[in-house]
Amino acid sequence: MAPGREDSADAVVDLVMRSIHGREARIIAHEGAGGIDGLLVWSLLPWDSSITGIRCSRISLLGGEGLGDMLSAWREVAGSEGVEYTTARLPCGDECHGARVESLKRAGFTRLEEIVYLSAPTGRTHDAPADIEQAQPGDMEMIREVARRSFSFDRFHSEPLFSREVADSIHEEWARNSFAGRADVVLMKKGPEGWPVGYCTVIVPDMKGAVAGWIDMLAVRPGEREKGKGRRLVKGAFYWLKARGIAEAALCTQSGNLPALGLYNKTGFREYATAETWSLRTTGQGCS
């Protein structure tokens, strides 16, 4: 079951910690009179760095006491490692939120977006949608093209640092990476010509305590929207997960992405947590 709203901050912490699974996490601790009372967890992002051409990192956890001190220590370490761009995705609504926001602002971060996490039971779907099929390696290039044309609300397109071309290429490579092992399945909806007009990627939980399958990407080509194709793809993801004994699906989107939120509301998703993404552009030496 998805957490209740009172547990939403803990839910986001769990999600962001899962997001660094497979990456080397770095920890900066603040020590008070009674011992460690604050933590900052961050990691380098090799994949983001390879696509954007700048050295990227992510702060996944920032909480407790000494927030400013930990951010100052992080700036020194990140600067020495040549980090040029950092995002921090952190929960909203917890008792540390106000102090965290002020500390990020003082450190030079700017608010980029608000993220909404949603979940839905997969049991709503009883039959496999006949028009949704599993994509094969030969479909990858056409699906990459759908990915390149279909996103605009995400943090890459919202970040002034990245051109539209770079932001589009990130999603194109994200789709390619889904075929290379990031996703457990790529589902697609074909048009009359036999070409994919929409797709979604699904990840099966492989960590202890994870109960929901994750819908990682969902896109429908512009010009093919408002025709029920997104809803069919969601139904296909539900059926695929349910067939594997997974009772819940989860995903996230931007709070400003009203078309996506409308689709998810119609397909049974309900919000259970929110987070904010903050970003900082640095020089890579001294993080000035």
Image: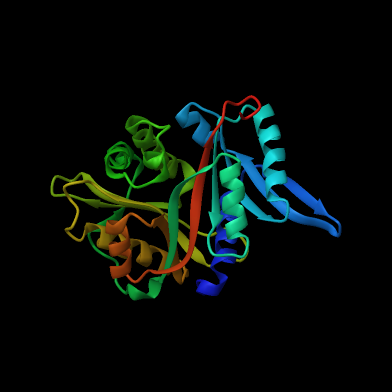
Q: Residue 41, percent across and down?
A: 66, 48
- Residue 266 visible? The answer is yes
Residue 219: % across, % down: 30, 50
Q: Is residue 220 above or below residue 169?
A: below
- Residue at point 20% right, 46% down? 222
Relative to 219, 94 lies left or right: right
Q: Is residue 256 above or below residue 156?
A: below
The image quarter containing residue 268 is bottom left
Q: Position of residue 81 (x, y in %)?
A: 66, 28
Q: In the rendered view of the protein, which quadrant contains the C terminus?
A: top right
Viewer-proximal residue among 259 and 182: 259
User: Of residues 122 and 119, which is closer to you in this image?
Assistant: 119
| Side of 126 where 213 appears, left or right | right
Q: Percent x, y for residue 228?
A: 20, 61
* Left or right: 178 in relation to 189: right
Compare residues 1 and 240 and report the one nearer the observer.
1
Tell me: residue 58, above or below residue 285. below
Q: Is residue 71 above or below residue 129?
A: above
Q: Residue at x 38, y 75 (%)?
A: 123
Residue found at the far left of this picture: 192
Report the label total: 0
Residue placed most toward the observer, 132 or 152:
152
Left or right relative to 197: residue 273: right
- Residue 210 seen from this side: no
How was this image coloured? rainbow
